[in-house]
């Protein structure tokens, strides 16, 4: 690799000290490296009342010759970058500046050796499955978005549980009452899904996980489904419309409110994220390392 682009979490690298150090190191080796020019977030643009088509990173600002995007921050920063840049299909390399990162490849201490391997083309690019969710109210689509980790549906408003009806490929699966439900990819299995008692799945797998959050029943268990199915989650009609309802969130970012009778349809996305790996460590070895630090 010869050309790089840096996206940084400004709250963790406010003066761009780490970003500039990486840029200087790469340019000292004869490579090109760009740094995201400003706090260019879709959220900020939205607050200003201007139109935007991205969340945090404007893909149009990334030069065409960029071969790898270096993402400085934590798992959240990497998830945001993956969603914003999915159409560009540029490999992402995560550098963890947080406390615990399952997605990031290295921490700050391992930056230079990792950059050396990237420049020497000693890396692999893993393709990760993503989800596509569409929320509907009376057959009117409210929102459609993608997620690399998960789509989570939780209560919205007062502290009360939500009734869910679950369908798979149009066939009724079950009804249950819970604080929420997580539909996760293998990549997201070590995220909220893990905290809610769901299974850990090797990230290169292609399937979908359904895990209830604090279910109010004794027979609710996580369910693993093939990636070709369509999952429909319907908000139970026992709740009053417009009072509390629920909320669906994509990778902890984009969200949409749902009322009684509303549903969200979830399928495997036709897009994939590409995460760069420079280490020859197995999934189980990485899992042991992360779990011992958590």
Image (tube, rainbow, N blue to C red):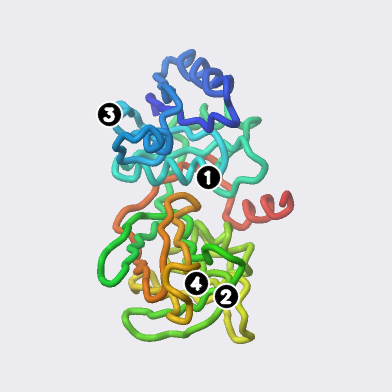
Mark 1 and 3 residues: CB-CB less than 8 Å, in contact? no
Mark 3 or mark 4, which is nearer to you?
4
Residue pictured at 38% horizontal, 80% vertical: 167
Q: Of callouts 2 and 4, which one flags the residue occurring earlier in the amino acid sequence? A: 2
Per the image, label 2 sits on a secondary structure element best described as strand
Residue 184, position as x, y percentages in the image: 48, 63
Left or right, residue 100 beside residue 169: right
Mark 2 and 1 residues: CB-CB less than 8 Å, in contact? no
Mark 2 or mark 3, which is nearer to you?
2
Q: Of callouts 1 and 3, which one flags the residue occurring earlier in the amino acid sequence? A: 3
**How far apart are labels 2 and 3 at the CA level?**
46 Å
Quadrant of the rendering where the N terminus is positioned:
top left
Q: Pick whichever, 84 or 152, lies toward us.
A: 152
* On screen, residue 252 above or below 10: below
Q: Of callouts 2 and 3, which one flags the residue occurring earlier in the amino acid sequence? A: 3
The residue that label 2 is drawn on is 178
The residue that label 1 is drawn on is 76
The residue that label 3 is drawn on is 64
Q: Is residue 68 visible?
A: no
Residue 209, position as x, y percentages in the image: 49, 69
């Amino acid at each position: 690799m010869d050309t790089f682009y840096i996206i940084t979490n400004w709250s963790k690298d406010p003066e761009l000290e780490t970003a500039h150090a990486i840029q200087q190191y790469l340019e000292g080796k004869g490579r090109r490296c760009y740094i995201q020019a400003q706090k260019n977030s879709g959220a900020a643009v939205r607050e200003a009342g201007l139109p935007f088509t991205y969340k945090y990173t404007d893909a149009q600002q990334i030069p065409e010759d960029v071969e790898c995007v270096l993402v400085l921050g934590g798992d959240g920063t990497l998830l945001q970058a993956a969603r914003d840049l999915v159409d560009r299909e540029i490999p992402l390399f995560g550098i963890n500046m947080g406390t615990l990162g399952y997605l990031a490849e290295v921490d700050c201490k391992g930056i230079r050796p990792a950059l050396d391997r990237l420049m020497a083309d000693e890396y692999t690019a893993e393709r990760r499955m993503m989800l596509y969710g569409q929320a509907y109210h009376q057959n009117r689509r409210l929102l459609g978005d993608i997620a690399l980790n998960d789509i989570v549906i939780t209560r919205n408003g007062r502290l009360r549980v939500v009734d869910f009806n679950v369908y798979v490929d149009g066939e009724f699966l079950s009804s249950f009452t819970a604080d929420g439900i997580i539909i996760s990819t293998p990549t997201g299995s070590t995220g909220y899904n893990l905290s809610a008692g769901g299974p850990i799945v090797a990230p290169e797998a292609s399937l979908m996980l359904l895990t209830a959050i604090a279910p109010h029943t004794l027979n609710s268990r996580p369910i693993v489904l093939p990636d070709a199915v369509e999952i429909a989650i319907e908000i139970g009609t026992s709740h009053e419309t417009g009072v509390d309802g629920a909320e669906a969130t994509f990778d902890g970012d984009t969200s949409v409110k749902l009322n009684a009778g509303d549903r969200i349809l979830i399928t495997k996305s036709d897009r994939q994220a590409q995460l760069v790996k420079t280490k020859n460590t197995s999934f189980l070895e990485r899992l042991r390392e992360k779990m011992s630090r958590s």
